[in-house]
Structures are given as structure tokens and as C-alpha cells.
Amino acid sequence: MSNDESVLVTGGTGFIAQHCILALLRHGYRVRTTVRSLAREAEVRSNLKEGGAEPGERLSLVVADLRADQGWAEAASGCVYVLHGASPTPSGDQVREEDWVKPAVGGNLRVLRAARDAGAKRVVLTSAFGAIGAGHKRMNRPFNETDWSDLSGHVWLYQKSKTLAERAAWDFIAREGHGLELSSVNPVAVLGPVLGPDYSHSIRLIKNLLDGLPRSPKINSSFVDVRDVADLHLRAMTDPVASGERFLASAGESMWMTEVAQVLQRRMGAAAGKVSARVLPNWLVRIAALTNPAMQGIVPLLGVNLNATGEKARRLLGWTPRSSEDAIVATAESLIRLDLLNKSAANA
């Protein structure tokens, strides 16, 4: 396919962004992507090659940072669509609330202004399940796109930043969009083939199990393959019915971590030799949370079913994702292929 239309993908070093770039290239688009430093261009192109693409001049990189205005006008210039996925992710560098919220909210507004001023038709915002399913009392139904995270409840700062950033985006479109269209994609835990050692935090769930995590806390999640998240972005980008809509990217029924471990044991053979399906008792998690900040975020999730439905995307956009089990296996296979497991685990 060949297509002269250009699409801006923000945050080109990101896991979802790189799979979006791969999908766009397969559909013949020209792609421009933003990075905070051109020193990472070789890494981006290497990861895309791992994903099966060598785009040459059909991919260009520009420098732009969510925390500054410079570069965004150049990035959006001439682009018909914008896929905006750049946002703070749990890296361990965030200390204060503003470390999360300011770049997420301010970054969304910078990108939307640049897209509007450049005459882009539509922005597809990569939001998150964290903007939908956090802070609620226990639900007796799957989460859907009408839900918003309750920030008066117990909400992790990452989830708060995603919620405030998405709300700010919809408010901008209503007040200052001047015809710019917006859709959002809200993925649950994103798995699937990694392209290099820099991958999404959800992938660590699988890596930790393969590396021999002795017990898993009793937490629950829905899953989706990153390739299907990218496919949903492209559908939301071009389908007229997607304008003004949110879409949960969820492949199926949620799973407990012990069930994820059992999938690995059943499907991965000797490579899953160190995988344990044992449960870490809730009381141990609560004790650990007294001194471990990572565990503090887990406590509110203990025993909570976080099932989320992707029915709307299937119905309106014809989206047909892979199963959660296949996404788990694809993740494991890629971690092994790229030699990203602890050596002791890989040789077990």
C-alpha cells in the first residue's frame, strides 16, 4: 500500500507507539514521531526492524517534549491525523503528584493545540483503563466507556494523571477544538511482542513470573495484545463513527495472576520452569506495604475483580482482538527470543 497522508505519533520510544507506527506503515502512511532526543533514533528504527519494518524516509523523527512548547508545531505540520500516546509511565522517577499530572495534562493540551492549529482532522488519544476503573467501590458488572475513575477514592498517581489528562482533552475539544475531532483508546494491561528492552510496565507481570516470582498477590486484570491496541487506534483514527467516542481496549474476561501463571505453565513448556501459580497472602502484602511504596498501590486491588469489556469497539468498529491467553504467550515468546529474562530463569 502507498499513502501520501502523514500521521504524527507522539512518544516514538513507547511500546504502544511503536506498534502504532508499525501498523501505520503497513497501511501505507507516512509517519512522523516525536522523541525527547534524536539520540534514540537508532533504537526506534532497530525496534521497528524487529517488528518487521524498515521504513527509511517514510518515517521521520522530531524533537518535542510534553513539558515544553517547542517542537510541537513542527511535529504536527502537514499531518492529517495524530495518535497521541506520549505520557508519563511508571518508571520510578516520579516522586511528587505534579511529576505525574503536569506533563500528562499539559502534554495533552500542547498536542491538541498543535493538531488544531496544523489543521489535523482527528486526534486519537491513548488514555488508559486507569482513567476508567480506579477508585470505585466494588462493581457487579464489567467496566465500560461510561465509567470514569473516582478520584475521591484510593487512586494511584499514575491513574490520577491519566484521568485528569483525558478529561482535560475532552474539555479542550468542547471549548477550543474548532472542529478538531477526538477519540480515545483506553487499554487495559497491554501485553504482546516486545521489540526491545524498553517495554511497557504491564510486560513486567509476565517477566516476573518467568523469572521465578515465588508467589503472586491476589490481583485481577483484563489484558490486550499491543498489536490489537494499535489496530484499534487506526480504526478510531479513520472511522467516522469513532469521533467523540471512548473505546476500551480489552480482549476478554479478566484474569487473576495465578491464572496467568497457569497459562504460562500450560503453553510454554520448559521455558515456564520457574513459573509459580502460588498466591501471596493478602496479609503479607499489607505488611509489606507499610514500608514498600510499590506494594502500597497493590493493597486497594487485592481481591477486586477489574473486568472490563471491549464490546463497544467490537460493535462499532469491527475490532476483533486476539485472546488474552494468546497475548500472554506472545509476550513470553518475545521475552525469550530477545533474551530479556534473567539467565537463571531462561536456563531453567
Image: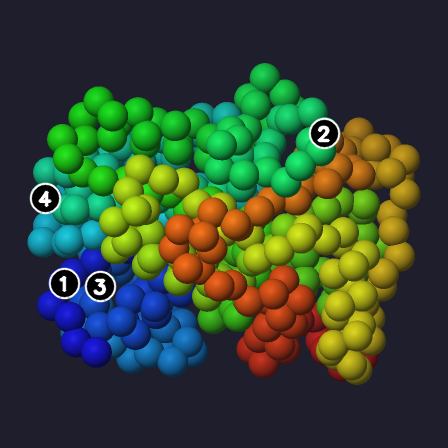
Residue labelled with disc 2: 138
- Asked if 334 appears above or below 311 in the picture, the reply is below
Residue 246, how many percent across, how many down? 41, 40
Direction from residue 197 to residue 342 in the image, left or right: right
Is there CB contact under 8 Å for labels 1 and 3? no
Q: Which residue is mark 1?
A: 5
Residue hosting label 3:
31
Pick the quarter of the image with the C terminus: bottom right
Instruction: Give the foreground label among 4 and 2.
Output: 2
Q: At 15% from the left edge and 46% from the top edge, which residue is drawn?
A: 120
Task: Say few, some or many: other residues with alpha carbon within 10 Å of mark 1 (under 14 / 14 to 19 / 20 or more).
Answer: few
Name the foreground residue: 47 vs 308: 308
The answer to whether residue 1 shows anywhere in this view is yes
Q: Identify which residue, 19 or 307, lies in the foreground.
A: 307
At x 45% / y 52%, what residue is drawn? 315
- Label 4 – label 2 distance at C-alpha: 43 Å
Dot 2: few (<14), some (14–19), or many (≥20) neighbours within 10 Å?
Answer: few
Indicate which label's residue lies in the foreground, 2 or 1.
Answer: 2
- Residue extending furthest toward the front: 315
The image quadrant of residue 299 is: top right
Give, as a three-letter code, the residue at label 2: Arg
| Mark in the foreground, 4 or 3 | 4
The span from disc 4 to disc 1 (Cα, nearest Å) is 13 Å
Q: Give the residue type at disc 4.
A: Gly
Q: Marks 2 and 1, Cα distance to the nearest angstrom?
A: 45 Å
**Label 3 secondary element:** strand
Q: Which residue is mark 4?
A: 119
